[in-house]
Amino acid sequence: MVALSFCCLLGLGCPKQAFAKIATPRLLHPEQIARIESKLPAYTVGSLQRKSQMDVLLEFITSLLEFPDPGDKLKELGELIKDVFQLMPSGKHMIGRDLGRLGPTASLKYCSAG
């Protein structure tokens, strides 16, 4: 239900159509293909990823500005984002874990005495 609302809000149609528009699989980025065909060094994956993210952001802003009242549409989108993208707790951090015995072992005491 939230995905449908999210896609309709952005004017992308149903979630399947929206996913097809934004996640069409490509082996290589079009600019990467041009570099390879021109026998030039390839771009880094990170730089292509950042450029693609900025392209999507710019396209989103452009489509948002086409709405009659972009401010209200942005507020509505902000509420949907809170529902869709929930922050998850990290399992990598040691907060709340039992760390066991932290004192020196007998062999460490022996080595430091000698």
Image: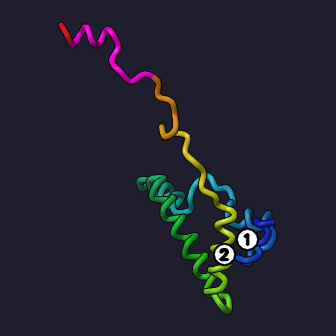
- Indicate the amino acid at tag 1: Phe
Taking the spot 65% from the left edge, 86% from the top edge, the residue there is: 72
- The answer to whether marks 2 and 1 mark residues whose Cβ atoms lie closer than 8 Å is yes
Residue topped by disc 2: 77
Taking the spot 59% from the left edge, 76% from the top edge, the residue there is: 59
How packed is label 2: few (under 14 Cα within 10 Å), some, or many (20 or more)? Answer: some
Q: Which residues are magenta?
A: 101-112
- Spatial CA distance of label 2 from label 1 is 7 Å
Q: Nearer the viewer, residue 105 or 91?
A: 105
Q: Tell which circle, 2 or 1, labels the residue nearer the N-terminal end.
A: 1
Occupied quadrant, residue 8: bottom right
Q: Does 34 sit left or right of 2 as displayed?
A: left
Taking the spot 55% from the left edge, 45% from the top edge, the residue there is: 90
Task: From this view, report whether residue 106 is shown above or below residue 93.
Answer: above
- Per the image, label 1 sits on a secondary structure element best described as helix
Q: Does 4 sit left or right of 100 as displayed?
A: right
Q: Quadrant of the N terminus?
A: bottom right
- Per the image, label 2 sits on a secondary structure element best described as helix
Q: Does 41 sit left or right of 59 as displayed?
A: left
Q: Nearer the viewer, residue 87 or 68?
A: 87
* Residue 10 position in % (x across, y down): 70, 76
Residue topped by disc 1: 6
* Residue 53 position in % (x across, y down): 53, 65
- Indicate the amino acid at tag 2: Leu
